[in-house]
Amino acid sequence: MAKQVNLADFQMTRTLGCGSFGRVKFSKYKQDGKYYAVKFMKKHEIIKLKQVDHINNEKRLMAQIDYPFVVNMMGYTKDDRFVYIIMECIGGGELFTHLRRARKFSDEQSKFYGAQVGGAFAHIHSKNIIHRDLKPENLLMCQNGYCKLTDFGFAKIIEPGTRTYTLCGTPEYIAPEVLLNKGHGKPVDWWTLGILIYEMIVGQPPFCDEDPMGIYQKILAGKIYFPKYFDKNAKALVKKLLTADLSKRYGNLKDGSDDIIKHKWFATINWQELEGLKIPAPYKPTMKDENDTSNYEEIPDSAELPPVVTGGQDPFVDW
């Protein structure tokens, strides 16, 4: 389980990524000699952008999740300027990078990653957590060729029977009920899985436009073009996931996530073997060893420090 750690025990090396509130650094933990990803988030930015609840949530939710296809949180800490989440380090880079390099994935590859995301959603939904921000950038590749879901910045606990109303997510991945501000819950994650599967197989998402408004209009119109090479079972599943009518969308019917997990397209997947990492991956990222970070883009380090947040107004009491 995640614990409070001492920042001085981490030796930071390079930056792996940049987010809205800070960056993620590749860091060696002196206590066990292993490498971790340390996510720095600027307190004053979080407070200024009224994201305190989101960030406190992210830490609280990540601490509850322990699943092979979700990035595990190892610890957390804070100082005058930042709050930090320490996560296992996933060295293979973003699925996004590999998808753009390959242009599109084979049916087998798409099914392999799609199954892992489906498993991850079924698991977090069983804890009443919704992720709300699936996209190829938020899936990280492991050295063994499996992938893990990351970035719980938009995640939220939704008690059964309740809904939430925050507009969030990436334009191409936003579900119609979010756009229409009807209130949303777990079904949004299943919609995003449909978009992801389509994007992996075709190389671009089903609703594209130069302008976000154009994307939203296409999402609401709901017309999807499937190329000839699209597997018929994959197409059947994607259609059931990209169903605007919530009373008909897979994942939201009486059998819940079973409609997806037990779908014909996934019939070739043995779920126990998948969760036990026993199925040979169709593709593995090129890595010299588990500490090789060459799959991440070079991001120059920033020397500027954010202002100090003084004790009196520090809303991060649980860190």
Image (spheres, helix red, strand yellow):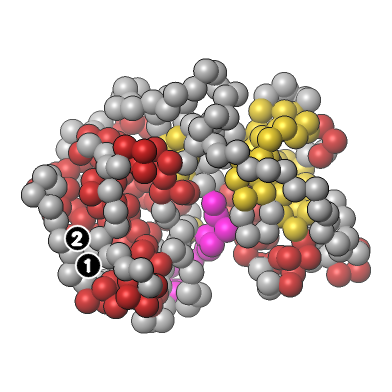
* Residue 53, placed above or below residue 287: below
Rendered location of residue 128, percent (x, y): 47, 59
In the rendering, at what x and y percent does residue 162 appear?
Answer: 45, 74
Q: Nearer the viewer, residue 93 or 125?
A: 93
132 over 32 or under it: above or below:
below
- The x and y percentages for residue 279 are 31, 24
The residue that appears at 71% across and 65% down in the rendered structure is 46
Q: Quadrant of residue 104?
A: top left
| Residue behind mark 1 | 243
- At 27% from the left and 39% from the top, the residue drawn is 105
Q: Check whether the beta carbons of the residues at disc 2 and disc 1 lie within 8 A of each other.
A: yes
Amino acid of disc 1: Thr
Residue 162 sits inside the magenta stretch: yes
The percent position of residue 63, horizontal first and vertical second, equals 62, 47
The quarter in which the N terminus is drawn is top right
Query: Quick one: SS at disc 2?
Result: helix
Name the foreground residue: 74 vs 127: 74
Q: Please tell me whether the stretch drawn in magenta is mainly helix, strand or loop.
A: loop
Instruction: Identify the residue at horizontal 66%, vertical 40% (top origin).
Output: 15
The residue positioned 65% from the left and 53% from the top of the image is 59
Reply above or below: 217 against 34: below
The stretch of residues the image draws in magenta is: 151-164
Does the magenta-highlighted stretch encompass residue 133?
no
Q: From where the camera sits, is residue 240 visible? A: yes
Three-letter code, disc 2 = Lys
| Inter-mark Cα distance, 2 to 1 | 6 Å
- Residue 253 visible at all: no
What label sits on residue 240 in the rendered view?
Answer: 2
Q: Is residue 180 left or right of residue 304?
A: left
